[in-house]
Amino acid sequence: MIGNRLNGLSFSFKGINWATYFLEFIHKNVLLGNDFQNLMVRLNDLLRRKSNYYQDIRAGVPAPIRLFRLKRPLIMDNPSSYLDANQKLWDQKTEVHVDSEFYDMKSFLAGQTSLKEIELPLLGDIKDKSLLHLQCHFGQDTLSLARMGAQVTGIDLSEKAVQTAQNLAKQLNLSAHFLASDVFQLDKKLEGQFDIVFTSYGVIGWLPELKSWARIIDHFLKPGGQFVFVEFHPVVWMFDDHFTRFDYAYFNTEAIIEEIEGTYADRNAPIKAKAYNWNHTLSDVIGSLLERGLQVTHFQEYDYSPYDCFNHTVKTKKGYQIKGMEGKIPMVYSLVVNKN
Ligand SMILES: C[S@@+](CC[C@H](N)C(=O)[O-])C[C@H]1O[C@@H](n2cnc3c(N)ncnc32)[C@H](O)[C@@H]1O
């Protein structure tokens, strides 16, 4: 360890010889040629591991930790870096999700809908309607919509998710069209307009900004068409992963870059990958749609999640809530928007 040679210059804090670790780290990473971003992730990780970070945490479950933030221009200078990273991550997640208890494939194959009680009444009778499902993951919701009689098109960034969705449609003998695409590039790959555009739960956090998102929704809606949206509430994303404190801004000020380990559907899954996320305020969401001239006809907030995808949840009569915060924080919201 080259740091040991400079012991006279080093200092300790809580038993950590920072100079030693820093020099060791520079030696391993700069001299071995890692790029700057990777270097920053590793530095952060090193400091976190060597500090007493985990002692503050309520439960000992090592969940994904948001490591550090970069100002958005660094990412937007090279948009493919966030898309490539997120696609790799979702390809890996898909492989785990298909076989997970969370996605309960057995019940789904036996005919159970994967749609939840929040979106079902908002969608209403969709028989014979054309429906575009954005960020459809591996197609359970899309195929549930097909079972309700809609003519569905599902799109997702992950090639693996789209292949899995296509195989599922074949297996279930359901008519559905799936396409691999970044949401923002969809108008270059897909033609036509739809009666309904639908997207739900854990979607907009993967998009850097919402003006382009609203443009795509508007582009694919027929006049008289409807956009149905259910999403986790931005308040949930302000907390650290253990809901002990506010770690993140409500506002979309910068990219959040995480080294992900595991996944919400299986925390022990052998997934280790970088993820790029953004927080989006309710005014960003509603404002971006209003700017397109779309009309908001429904907006509601819920103090529970129908999915058990967070740490420290308790199952209540409504759904899943965070222990100690039952009924105190919004966890999901729904929005319906019409195009004249
Ligand atoms: C949490 S999942 C969607 C949740 C869905 N309700 C479900 O559980 O089946 C998020 C999806 O967004 C997709 N995604 C992420 N970034 C995207 C992008 N830029 N364009 C299209 N899809 C994207 C991911 O591949 C993933 O399948």
Image: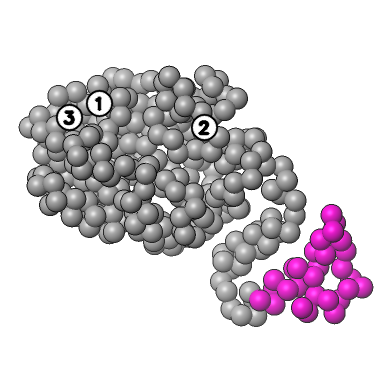
- At label 2, counting other C-alpha atoms closer than 10 Å, the crowd grade (few under 14, some 14-19, many 20 or more) is some
First reached walking from the N terminus: tag 2 or tag 1: 1
Q: Is residue 245 above or below residue 16?
A: above
Q: Which residue is mark 1?
A: 120
Circle number at residue 198 = none
Q: Nearer the viewer, mark 1 or mark 3?
A: 1
Q: Amino acid at mark 1?
A: Leu
In what element is the residue under mark 3?
Answer: strand
Where residue 258 appears, as percent x and y from the top left, is 53, 53
How many marks the image carries: the answer is 3
In what element is the residue under mark 1?
Answer: helix
* Picture quadrant where residue 51 is located: bottom right
- At label 1, counting other C-alpha atoms closer than 10 Å, the crowd grade (few under 14, some 14-19, many 20 or more) is few
Q: Is residue 77 left or right of residue 227?
A: right
Kindly report the distance in space between the C-alpha atoms of the residues bearing marks 2 and 3: 37 Å
Q: What residue span does the magenta drawing correspond to?
A: 1-28
First reached walking from the N terminus: tag 2 or tag 3: 3
Seen at 18% across and 55% down, the residue is 167
Q: Is residue 94 left or right of residue 12?
A: left
First reached walking from the N terminus: tag 1 or tag 3: 1
Evaluate whether residue 150 shows in this view.
yes
Q: Which residue is mark 3?
A: 225
* Picture quadrant where residue 217 is located: top left
Circle number at residue 313 = 2
In what element is the residue under mark 2?
Answer: strand
Q: Amino acid at mark 2?
A: Thr
Evaluate whether residue 66 shows in this view.
no
- At label 3, counting other C-alpha atoms closer than 10 Å, the crowd grade (few under 14, some 14-19, many 20 or more) is many
Seen at 77% across and 78% down, the residue is 1
